[in-house]
Image (cartoon, grey):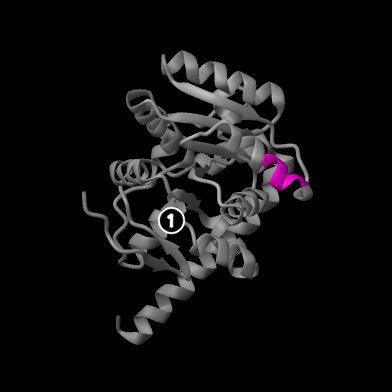
Amino acid sequence: MGYPARIEIMGAPIDPYTMEQTVSRTKDFVETGVFAHLAGVNADKLLQMRSDQTMDRMIRQCEIVNADGASMVMAARRLGIDIPERVAGIDLMHELCRLSQSEGYRIFLLGATRDTVETARRKLEESYPGLDICGIMDGYFDDEDFSAVGEEVASSRPNIVFVGITSPKKEHVIEHFRLMGLKGVYVGVGGSFDVISGSIPRAPLWMQRMGLEWLFRMMKEPKRLMRRYVMGNARFMRLVSREIRSKERSGK
């Protein structure tokens, strides 16, 4: 299968892959036994990259960077850039569990609370009979524990590790694993374990299709997410408008 070249959207690298292409390339990584970091960029991550050079560097060295956010797909289309579809982290996680179920890949779950990750493990094993979840670990560890966590993960010999930790800790720990020489595919999935375990509901399908999943999440956790989404989305839309005006002036 061929894979389109990486593009840039408002300074953020994006691999314009479909879900099928993302899963296929992940399989290539597993079969060749290399280290790979899969990340998703949404409006919030793009803003983080613009204000944090370390975050920008970490995302740029990822083997796959998906458009994980309706906002990124919308912005690309307004800028005349073709992104075939959104590849959301939780949807990718399910697709990779199906792949692992059929191919016999070993899965490790890293993140969330102990109760949440244990419940997520049970739910995934129920949904994908025969899925080999070779290890789990909660996400409550400090930066100085990264190496010990990496050794624990490596001892389970996983093919795919889902990292359900918030940014920027998620990116830092995965890139630390790269420096340690670990093998396998590391997929940042944010709060997906909370959704899979049933701790937090996911937005209805109609809201997902309309690009309103952020609104649903904000309604469920207003204290934590109100400022991030209201202020962040306003900043993001200003950037999109500025980019459109720049393209119009340049005649591109």
Quadrant, the C terminus: bottom left
Residue at x 68% of width, y 47% of height:
226
Residue at x-position 38% and y-position 23%: 101
Is 190 magenta? The answer is no
- Residue 85 image offset from top left, x and y in percent: 33, 48
Q: Quick check: 64 left or right of 116?
A: left
Seen from the viewer's position, the closer of residues 2 and 238 is 2
Q: Quadrant of residue 217?
A: top right
Query: Would residue 148 be counted in the magenta stretch?
Result: yes
Where does the image place residue 149, in percent across and percent down from the top left?
68, 40
Q: Residue furthest bottom?
A: 250
- Whether residue 4 is visible, yes or no, is yes
Query: Badge 1 is on which residue?
Result: 63
Q: Tell me the chief SS of the magenta region.
A: helix
| Left or right for 141, reference 83 | right
Where are the magenta residues, as a range? 145-149
The tally of labels here is: 1
Does residue 235 appear anywhere in the picture? no
From the viewer's perspective, is residue 37 above or below residue 197? below
Three-letter amino acid code at the position of disc 1: Glu
Q: For the view shown, which residue lies furthest in the left direction? A: 1
Residue 109 at x, y percent in the picture: 57, 31
